[in-house]
Image (cartoon, rainbow, N blue to C red):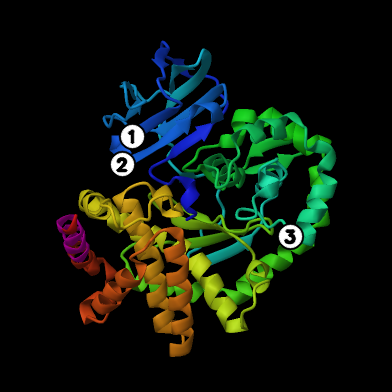
């Protein structure tokens, strides 16, 4: 999962308010400096707002659960205030009036009850063992809208900007770059924006019916909820005025070709079978949603009910990797890495939840994440561990399935990648996991590696503490 998603338990920023919320009395917070430091102890998350960079009316959004209060601490090092989630599962906003050098800005601390991802009543794809590659019109619309914002059009990490497809988008949608929707998105977008993830993934649930956007499934809800409905009229107007349907239909065969190429290159069945041999979770179907606009921003969700469950993955096209100088098999290995490191989150994360306190304590220590790196975006110890393990498990898969030379290529590529992203101990973490994997019982059940990995990491953290 992309680190900038701030995946430390659903922490989101946006610059507009939603309707139908309970509004609490405003709190006043005069600043002595130019920075607001925030911390959410429940989530092990913290960061800062620079006053001059804040929008005049900004929303700080968190999901919360019943009987599990979430506290937000705001401070300027000289003084502090606390904002606590409501006792009832009601969307609630507490405005915090921040004053600095005579200027007033409002930080709306917003608590949102959790969404429960589930299937729609007319879901028709409940077929065990089925995997689907597809593109969704509304998903593509969201990618386009964000990619033509001022910052999105310069964000080559998130979007593929140096392609004929993007050049066509830039030309076609140029007259609509100042549409009120794009103006709104411009206020919120930054590289790796969690708002982008919320919109693009919930968009998969929508369809254009004439001039109207409707929730058509296959899900009732996503983890992020149905974000587009917050500004439905703006999205509908943008789609109508830009004649988005005509643009999408022009490229429909292109999208289908990308799906076909991805299905040929990615050995989904082998990855699927391998993961379910190593972990207890089982999934009935996989969905892979591909956009030619997506570059380095990949993610996944799992949706379950009493009868059925599936994984959905959002990723780039195979052409995204072919632009780099690789052999055919190396391209396959690298593309497999993009998909498998999303797939295996759905197997790893549920097991990690059973070790949450230990993982937060051990992997939350200094030394596991490089300060100021992308890795900090995973928020806390369990988030750091899951990312370490996700990529290490991918290497085990390559070791089992490919030649020794190809495995050596994968290890170097992955170690370099993880180190650059801010996971400085990936090489030794993988070496420890591989050592454990050679034990017969762990090779057949990777969940048995957890206690030994935690114990090993604890010893390393203790040695770090002793050297201080």
Residue 81 locus on image (x, y percent): 32, 20
Magenta stretch holds residue 19:
no
Quadrant housing residue 451: bottom left
Q: Which mark is residue 162?
A: 3
Crowdedness near tag 3: few (<14), some (14–19) or many (≥20) residues, C-alpha within 10 Å: few
Residue to which mark 2 is pinned: 44
Which region of the structure is painted magenta? 456-466
Q: Is residue 130 visible?
A: yes
Q: CA distance from mark 2 to mark 3?
A: 38 Å
- Determine whether, in the image, residue 108 is placed left or right of residue 392: right
Residue to which mark 1 is pinned: 40
> Which element carries disc 3, helix, strand or loop?
loop
- In which quadrant is the C terminus drawn? bottom left
For the residues bearing labels 2 and 3, Cβ distance under 8 angstroms: no
Q: CA distance from mark 3 to mark 1?
A: 39 Å
Crowdedness near tag 1: few (<14), some (14–19) or many (≥20) residues, C-alpha within 10 Å: some
């Amino acid at each position: 999962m992309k680190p900038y998603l701030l995946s430390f338990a659903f922490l989101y920023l946006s610059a507009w308010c939603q309707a139908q919320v309970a509004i609490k009395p405003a709190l006043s917070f005069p600043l002595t400096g130019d920075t607001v430091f925030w911390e959410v102890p429940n989530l092990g998350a913290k960061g800062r707002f620079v006053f001059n960079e804040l929008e005049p009316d900004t929303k700080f959004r968190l999901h919360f659960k019943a009987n599990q209060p979430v506290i937000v601490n705001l401070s300027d090092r000289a003084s502090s205030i606390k904002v606590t989630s409501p006792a009832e599962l009601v969307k609630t906003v507490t405005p915090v009036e921040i004053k600095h050098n005579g200027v007033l800005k409002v930080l709306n601390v917003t608590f949102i009850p959790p969404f429960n991802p589930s299937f729609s009543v007319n879901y028709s794809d409940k077929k065990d063992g089925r995997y689907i590659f597809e593109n969704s019109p509304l998903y593509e619309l969201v990618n386009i809208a964000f990619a033509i914002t001022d910052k999105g059009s310069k964000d080559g990490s998130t979007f593929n900007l140096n392609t004929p497809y993007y050049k066509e988008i830039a030309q076609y949608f140029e007259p609509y770059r100042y549409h009120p929707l794009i103006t709104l998105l411009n206020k919120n977008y930054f590289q790796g924006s969690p708002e982008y993830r919320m919109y693009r993934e919930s968009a998969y649930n929508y369809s254009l019916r004439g001039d109207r956007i409707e929730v058509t499934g296959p899900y009732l809800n996503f983890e992020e909820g149905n974000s587009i409905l917050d500004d439905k009229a703006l999205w509908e107007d943008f789609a109508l005025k830009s004649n988005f349907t005509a643009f999408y239909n022009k490229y429909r065969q292109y999208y289908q070709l990308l799906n076909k190429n991805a299905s040929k290159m990615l050995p989904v069945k082998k990855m699927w079978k391998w993961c379910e041999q190593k972990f207890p979770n089982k999934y009935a179907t996989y969905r892979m949603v591909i956009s030619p606009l997506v570059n380095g921003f990949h993610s996944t969700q799992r949706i379950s009910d009493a009868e059925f469950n599936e994984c959905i993955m959002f990723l780039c096209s195979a052409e995204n990797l072919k632009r780099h100088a690789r052999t055919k098999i190396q391209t396959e290995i690298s593309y497999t890495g993009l998909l498998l490191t999303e797939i295996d989150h759905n197997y790893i994360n549920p097991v990690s939840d059973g070790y949450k306190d230990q993982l937060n304590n051990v992997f939350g220590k200094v030394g596991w994440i490089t300060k100021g790196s992308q890795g900090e975006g995973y928020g806390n110890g369990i988030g750091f561990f899951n990312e370490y393990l996700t990529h290490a498990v991918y290497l085990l898969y390559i070791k089992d399935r490919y030649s020794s030379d190809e495995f050596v290529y994968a290890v170097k590529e992955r170690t370099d990648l993880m180190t650059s992203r801010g996971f400085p101990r990936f090489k030794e973490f993988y070496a420890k996991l591989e050592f454990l994997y050679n034990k017969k019982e762990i090779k057949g059940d990777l969940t048995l590696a957890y206690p030994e990995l935690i114990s090993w990491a604890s010893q390393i953290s203790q040695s770090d503490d002793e050297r201080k």
